[in-house]
Amino acid sequence: MTHEHLVFGVTIDQIDELSTLLRTITANGDAMTFCDMSYLQPQNVSTLGEAILDSALALRDILDQVNEQRLEQKQASAAAP
C-alpha cells in the first residue's frame, strides 16, 4: 500500500466552480448528443459548442490555479492521514 501525500490546496469556491463547469459541459454535451438535431438551428449547435469550449477553458484555468497552489512539504505531510 502506498502512502498518498497532499500536494495541492483547493478552495471551496474552486471546487464549486469546477462542479458547475463540469455540469455545464455535461448538460450541453448531452443536449448535442441526445437531442433530435432536426429541431436545432445551425446557430444553436454553434452556441452549444461555444458554451462547452468556454466552460472547458474556464475549467482548465482553475486547474492551472490549483497547480500553483502547492502545499509546503511540511504542511502536506502533516495533513495526510
Image (tube, rainbow, N blue to C red):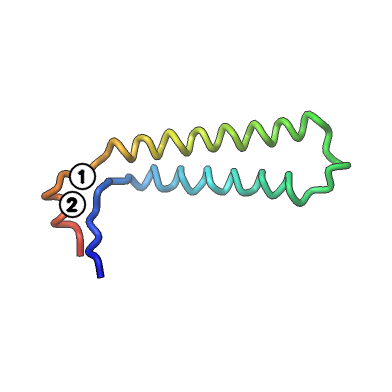
Q: Is residue 39 left or right of residue 10?
A: right
Q: Is residue 40 left or right of residue 64?
A: right
Residue in the picture at 61% in, 37% down: 52
Horizontal and vertical percent for residue 58? 49, 34
Residue in the picture at 72% in, 31% down: 46
Q: Nearer the viewer, residue 12 or 29?
A: 29
Horizontal and vertical percent for residue 7? 24, 49
Q: Which residue was labeled with disc 2?
A: 76
Horizontal and vertical percent for residue 41? 83, 33
In the rendered image, the residue lying farthest to the right is: 38
Relative to residue 61, is residue 18 depicted above or below?
Answer: below
Q: Are marks 2 and 1 in contact (CB under 8 Å)?
A: yes
Residue in the picture at 81% in, 31% down: 42
Q: Label 1: few (<14), some or many (≥20) within 10 Å?
A: some
Marker disc for residue 71: 1
**Image quarter hosting the N terminus:** bottom left
